[in-house]
């Protein structure tokens, strides 16, 4: 059983200071849906745990707002709050969908967006949607604030680039214009409480029936959750016909294998990732 | 031959022997579960909830290997930790073997959950710290994990008593006719192999026990929720080295068992008792989910090889079958293979049958009883096999099954004549009509889309109770009090299946008093006789016979009191109806039940009746060429499943399941349907997603985040159909349901997948990879 102290500070500054002084020994408690499991499993990530730093109660880390077309979600906002948010329903339906598919009701009520990002699981559903949205993270540290594109916070599975003493405080993205085709899909081994085998987010912009902008985010397939620019390029400038969509989808799988090589799961993932990408694009476009 | 089937015509005109034509006052009624309120309000106290003054907490240290020998163990540091009262290793328990040859503590590790040390301390924290402080060095030993490895020439021996790794007592044969001579003359011979996997019970309550030393007439009392308190008593008495009469087991409210709360539970109770004996303090030992998954038994993985000979007319002539199961490192369930051998040929009339069932030891987790007790695996194979044979023959599989199915008067593979009613055909026909089977099946054959629907049928039967496996005997007690309430008890236990409710209804029916007057108290081994294991779907059907007899006898005592003290008429003129004693034919002669109970008690008459029931011997012979009556009766069942297969991802969505069971008499339709709903979910998990990830004997998915069972979003719409018939074997004609509810679901789903895709899944589970690629993908690339 891991023995640790529970600590809680009044300000973000004090919290960052403490975290900076206790780099490996202090872990942040947000929703706790990952941390408590890691503590129970004595996961290597918490091997040196001495302090659990509860950031619940710090002001300004919770809530969803939209200003001048930029949506900002506080790091402590729960998945359930994202799912129920009228702002997200308008500005990023794919994110609401992704958050609705996280775990079960208990996970969604406790688990936070910030936690989902920082835990850096390849299967994190909200992360794939946020990567597709080109979200930007606001990170506060002992040396002030910085902004970081979300895709750059991931190093590999369960490893992020946050520096000692840094806390993710918010994630922002440009609100989608009404009517922007977007979708999120997930494949799990069951319909609820499922860890994604793969998940896909898609946002498209079209003019005169031609794709002018395409974003395809993919989780649980690449070394980190990321957009697949080469597949997006297949769509851009084209009419999204079945052939073009299939070509883009196929490019996602090709790009995956190029980076990951052939692994034990590739035989399954190669064909099925294409299917998911194709379906997500079709869903975004409202094609049956 | 019994009375003809009672046909019940539902609206729409389909005639069916469905529930509803038997005349009962309290049976056939959806009485609320008598234990429901305590459970849903949280008042129910499970073993882990109990606290005693001075109680210590226990913990167990397991090996990180599946096959190893301890070369060095040092507990000095563990003993120094504050709060630690006891640290024990195998050195402190020399040669102490349990029932089933498990060791409570051992230096020879035969599977992952063989324990090397245990600890008792004043806090959970001290227990964990002490377990971590024990220093152990191991030498890994050669091991076998698969059936093939275990049976290979020169394979390492898992258990010294069984060189060659074949467990002698687990070998069972069935011989009928002469397959050797018949196969060559058959128009078609089909051979197939099927395989199944390890499945976890996943009961909500993990194993828990509190052992309290007594120092009186009893040495030790253990509070625990187990599958069989009397077996647990056996375990604990052996562990303590005391007489069984000195050990008392109190059955606490039990959060599920499904056959599983026996071996690990017995060890947990025993370890708690050993530590309580040494420390003279109560000791609570509760398994974590991870310990429960690595240590508890699993459904036996099986390799099933079949050979079927059939003629062009569609009649099966011969069936040969070899079933080999992976026992893991220990085995207390050799008798499962009796059941397996009897049911291996399915519910079919085949003149020549040759069945061999055997089990092999490996260094994997131990296989044990799990809902179905071999039938889910066998039916998965057998009911696909029948369709594969029919397809090769060019006959409609449903027609083929109906042509060959057992009917009243037929001989089973063990040469048991089915004298009681066999309404299998009615069950099957009803489900075919209700599910619109043929129309859907034809539609589903020509689908062009990506998502393809399919519909599948499985038909099966299950021998009720223990049958010739062992004596299906048990005892019950029925007592009236002077206030007119009734206390009942049985040696069989409630573990969530609804036994207390059903037994209460049986007594209510027999005495003709309202169920609210009856209180089922539950097992304390000091106050009720050993009624054997609560398993084999035996309790409601067979185990309650003694309850009915006891209630009948008590009723006759009360009638005698009324006869002597009140009505002054012969007892034959008196009856007990709706809570009143009446004089037959005299309208106003009524005395309330409680008034009679008061008088009965104060005049010193017998208010308690204990009754034992031992069914007549069936006369089954296990000798070569033996056989005979294997079970007193059979439950006949059919399941139709409808699925939608995503042919691009391999995902299978189970849309609807129609489940029909001839249960003889429905004691409680609500609990019966509850069994079916839960059984369908369990069958779905077995077929599609549940699978223990075990590599070199080490289980990878040790918790329910990675051991995947169906959620409420996954389970299908379930349409239960409860059939009744006249069968003399069970109480009020009741037959088994708990296990039939799950055992044919998997095969119906797999047959539905075939209808959708044209592909056969011959190895379970039918997960994403198997359905899409027809192969199993695992990290590392192989088994």
Image: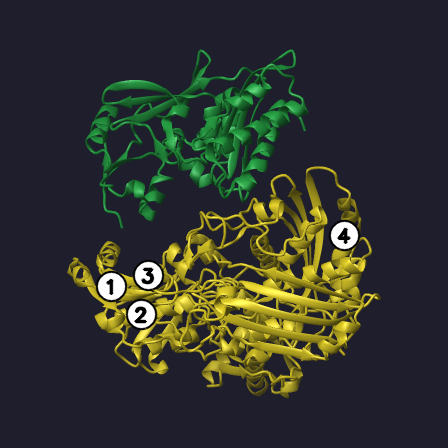
Chain colours: A green, B yellow
Question: Which of marks 2 and 4 precedes in the sequence?
Answer: 2
In percent of the image, x 26 and y 61: which residue is there?
B137
Mark 2 falls within which chain? B
Name the residue tied to disc 2: B106
Between tags 1 and 3, which lies in front?
3
Q: Pointers 4 and 3 in contact (CB under 8 A)?
A: no
Question: Which of marks 1 and 2 precedes in the sequence?
Answer: 2
Q: Mark 4 and mark 1, same subunit?
A: yes
Relative depth, front residue between B161 and B227: B161
Please indicate whether residue B707 sits to the left or right of residue B308 in the image: left
Name the residue tied to disc 3: B63
Under circle 3, the secondary element is loop
- How much space separates mark 2 and mark 1, taking CA atoms? 18 Å
Checking the image for residue B120, the label placed there is 1
Under circle 1, the secondary element is strand
Task: Tell me the quadrant of the picture where the N terminus of chain B can be found.
Answer: bottom right
Name the residue tied to disc 4: B437
Question: Which of marks 3 and 4 precedes in the sequence?
Answer: 3
How many C-alpha atoms fall within 10 Å of the one at disc 2: few (<14), some, or many (≥20)? many
Q: Is residue B773 above or below residue A121?
A: below
């Amino acid at each position: 059983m891991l023995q640790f102290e529970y600590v809680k500070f009044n300000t973000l500054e004090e919290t960052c200071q403490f975290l900076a002084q206790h780099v490996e020994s202090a872990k942040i408690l947000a929703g706790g849906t990952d941390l408590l499991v890691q503590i129970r499993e004595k996961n290597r990530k918490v091997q040196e745990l001495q302090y659990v730093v509860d950031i619940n109660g710090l002001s300004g880390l919770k809530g969803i707002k939209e200003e001048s077309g930029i949506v900002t979600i506080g790091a402590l906002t729960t998945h359930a709050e994202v799912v129920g948010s009228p702002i997200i329903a308008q500005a990023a339906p794919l994110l609401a969908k992704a958050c609705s598919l996280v775990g079960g009701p208990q996970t969604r009520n406790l688990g936070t967006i910030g936690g989902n990002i920082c835990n850096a699981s390849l299967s994190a559903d909200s992360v794939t949607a946020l990567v597709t949205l080109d979200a930007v993270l606001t990170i506060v540290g002992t040396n002030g604030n910085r902004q970081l594109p979300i895709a750059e916070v991931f190093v590999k599975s369960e490893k992020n680039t946050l520096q000692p003493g840094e806390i993710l405080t918010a994630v922002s993205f440009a609100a989608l214009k009404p009517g922007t085709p977007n979708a999120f899909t997930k494949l799990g081994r069951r319909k609820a409480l499922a860890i994604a085998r793969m998940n896909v987010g898609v946002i498209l912009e079209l003019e005169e029936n031609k794709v002018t902008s395409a974003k395809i985010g993919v989780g649980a397939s690449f070394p980190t959750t990321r957009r697949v620019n080469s597949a997006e390029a297949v769509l851009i400038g084209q009419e999204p016909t079945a052939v073009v969509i299939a070509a883009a989808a196929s490019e996602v799988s090709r790009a995956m294998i190029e980076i990951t090589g052939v692994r034990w799961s590739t035989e399954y993932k190669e064909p099925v990732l294409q299917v998911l990408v194709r379906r997500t694009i079709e869903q975004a476009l409202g094609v049956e | 031959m019994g009375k003809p089937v009672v046909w019940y015509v539902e609206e729409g005109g389909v005639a069916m022997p469905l529930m509803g034509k038997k005349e009962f006052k309290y049976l056939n009624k959806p009485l609320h579960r008598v234990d429901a309120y305590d459970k849903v309000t949280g008042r129910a106290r499970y073993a882990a909830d109990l606290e005693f003054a001075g109680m210590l907490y226990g913990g167990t240290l397991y090996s990180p290997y599946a096959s190893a020998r301890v070369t060095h163990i040092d507990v000095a540091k563990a003993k120094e930790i504050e709060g630690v009262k006891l640290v024990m290793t195998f050195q402190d328990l020399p040669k102490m073997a349990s029932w089933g040859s498990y060791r409570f503590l051992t230096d020879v590790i035969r599977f992952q959950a063989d324990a090397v040390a245990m600890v008792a301390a004043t806090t959970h924290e001290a227990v964990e710290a002490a377990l971590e402080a024990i220093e152990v060095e191991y030498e890994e030993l050669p091991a076998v994990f698969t059936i093939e490895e275990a049976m290979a020439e020169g394979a390492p021996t898992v258990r010294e008593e069984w060189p060659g790794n074949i467990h002698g007592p687990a070998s069972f044969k069935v011989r009928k006719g002469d397959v050797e001579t018949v196969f060559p003359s058959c128009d078609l011979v089909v051979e197939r192999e099927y395989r199944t996997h390890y499945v976890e019970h996943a009961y909500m309550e993990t194993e828990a026990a509190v052992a309290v030393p007594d120092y009186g007439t009893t040495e030790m009392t253990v509070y625990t929720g187990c599958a069989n308190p009397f077996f647990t008593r056996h375990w604990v008495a052996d562990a303590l080295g005391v007489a069984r009469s000195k050990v008392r087991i109190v059955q606490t409210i039990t959060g599920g068992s499904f056959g599983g709360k026996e071996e690990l539970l017995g060890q947990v109770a025993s370890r708690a008792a050993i530590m309580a004996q040494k420390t003279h303090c109560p000791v609570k030992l509760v398994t974590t989910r991870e310990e429960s998954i690595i240590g508890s038994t699993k459904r036996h993985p099986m390799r099933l090889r079949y050979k079927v000979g059939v003629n062009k007319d569609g009649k099966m002539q011969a069936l040969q079958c070899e079933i080999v199961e992976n026992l893991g490192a220990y085995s207390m369930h050799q008798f499962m293979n009796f059941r397996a051998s009897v049911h291996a040929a399915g519910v079919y009339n085949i003149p020549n049958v040759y069945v061999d069932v055997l089990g092999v030891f490996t260094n994997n987790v131990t296989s044990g009883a799990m809902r179905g007790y071999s039938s889910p695996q066998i039916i998965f194979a057998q009911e696909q096999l029948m369709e594969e044979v029919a397809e090769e023959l060019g006959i409609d599989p449903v027609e083929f099954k109906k042509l060959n199915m057992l009917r009243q008067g037929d001989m089973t593979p063990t040469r048991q004549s089915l004298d009681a009613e066999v309404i299998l055909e009615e069950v099957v026909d009803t489900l075919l009509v209700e599910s619109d089977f043929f129309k859907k099946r034809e539609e589903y054959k020509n689908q062009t889309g990506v998502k393809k629907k399919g519909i599948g049928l499985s038909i099966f039967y299950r021998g009720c109770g223990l049958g010739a496996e062992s004596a299906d005997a048990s005892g019950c007690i029925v007592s009236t009090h002077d206030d007119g309430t009734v206390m009942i008890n049985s040696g069989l236990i409630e573990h969530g299946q609804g036994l207390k409710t059903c037994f209460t209804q049986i007594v209510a029916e027999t005495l003709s008093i309202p169920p609210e007057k009856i209180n089922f108290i539950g097992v304390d081994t000091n106050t009720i006789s050993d009624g054997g294991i609560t398993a084999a779907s035996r309790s409601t059907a067979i185990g309650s016979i003694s309850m009915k007899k006891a209630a009948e006898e008590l009723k006759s005592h009360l009638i005698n009191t009324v006869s002597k003290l009140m009505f002054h008429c012969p007892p034959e003129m008196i009856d007990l109806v709706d809570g009143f004693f009446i004089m037959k034919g005299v309208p106003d002669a009524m005395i309330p039940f409680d008034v009679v109970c008061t008088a009965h008690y104060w005049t010193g008459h017998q208010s308690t009746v204990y009754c034992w029931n031992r069914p007549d011997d069936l006369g089954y012979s296990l000798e070569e060429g033996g056989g005979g009556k294997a079970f007193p009766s059979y439950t006949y069942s059919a399941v139709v499943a409808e699925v939608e297969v995503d042919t691009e991802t391999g995902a299978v969505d189970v849309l609807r399941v129609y489940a029909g069971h001839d249960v003889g008499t429905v004691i409680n339709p609500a609990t019966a349907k509850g069994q079916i709903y839960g059984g369908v979910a369990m069958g779905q998990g077995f077929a599609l997603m549940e699978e223990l990830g075990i590599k070199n004997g080490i289980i990878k998915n040790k918790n329910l985040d990675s051991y995947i069972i169906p959620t409420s979003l996954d389970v299908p719409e379930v349409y239960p159909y409860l059939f009744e018939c006249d069968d003399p074997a069970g109480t009020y004609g009741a037959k088994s349901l708990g296990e039939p509810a799950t055992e044919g679901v998997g095969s119906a789903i797999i047959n539905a997948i075939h209808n959708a895709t044209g592909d056969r899944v011959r190895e379970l589970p039918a997960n994403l990879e198997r359905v899409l690629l027809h192969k199993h993908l695992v990290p590392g690339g192989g088994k």
